Amino acid sequence: MLSVLEERFPHVIKRLHLVWGDPGTFDAMFSDLMLDKRGDRTGWPLDAWAELNFLQSVHHLAYGVAQYRAFQPDPFDPSWIR
C-alpha cells in the first residue's frame, strides 16, 4: 500500500528524498513545498498536508531543525535581553 504522497505526488517524495538528512536543505525544500510562490496553487489536500507534516516531524526528531530555527528565545524569561 502506497502513502498519499507516493500515490498522488511522487515528485514530492523524490524532492524530499534528495534533501533527507540535511536540516537546512530540508527546511528550505519544505518551505518551498508549503508556500505558494507562483500565486496559482490551491493548496494541499488534507491527507497530503497531514503526511507532509508527519514527515517534517520525523525529520526534525531524527536530524534536528535547521540551525537558524534552533534558537527560540523565551520572551518571558527575565534574563533574555532584547
Image (cartoon, rainbow, N blue to C red):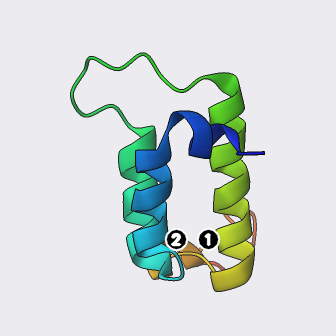
Q: Residue 33's x, y, as percent?
A: 41, 44
Q: Which residue is mark 2?
A: 69
Q: Looking at the picture, does residue 17 appear above or below residue 47?
A: below
14 left or right of 71 in image: left
> Callout 2: helix, strand or loop?
helix
Mark 1: few/some/many CA within 10 Å (<14, 14-19, 20+): few
Mark 2: few/some/many CA within 10 Å (<14, 14-19, 20+): few
| Mark identifier at residue 72 | 1
Q: Looking at the picture, does residue 26 appear above or below residue 63?
A: above
Q: Residue 9's x, y, as percent?
A: 49, 39
Q: Looking at the picture, does residue 32 appear above or below residue 14?
A: above
Q: Looking at the picture, does residue 24 appear above or below residue 46?
A: below
Quick one: 76 or 42, which is closer to the camera?
42
Q: Residue 67's x, y, as percent?
A: 48, 82
- Where is residue 21, by image quadrant? bottom right
Which amino acid type is marked by label 1? Gln
For discs 1 and 2, the disc positioned in front in the rendered view = 2
At a point 75% along the width and 76% down the height, the residue shown is 61
Q: Residue 53's x, y, as percent?
A: 67, 48
31 left or right of 74 in image: left
Quick one: 44 or 3, which is closer to the camera?
3
Tag 1 near tag 2, CB within 8 Å: yes
Quick one: 70 or 47, which is closer to the camera?
47
Which amino acid type is marked by label 2? Arg
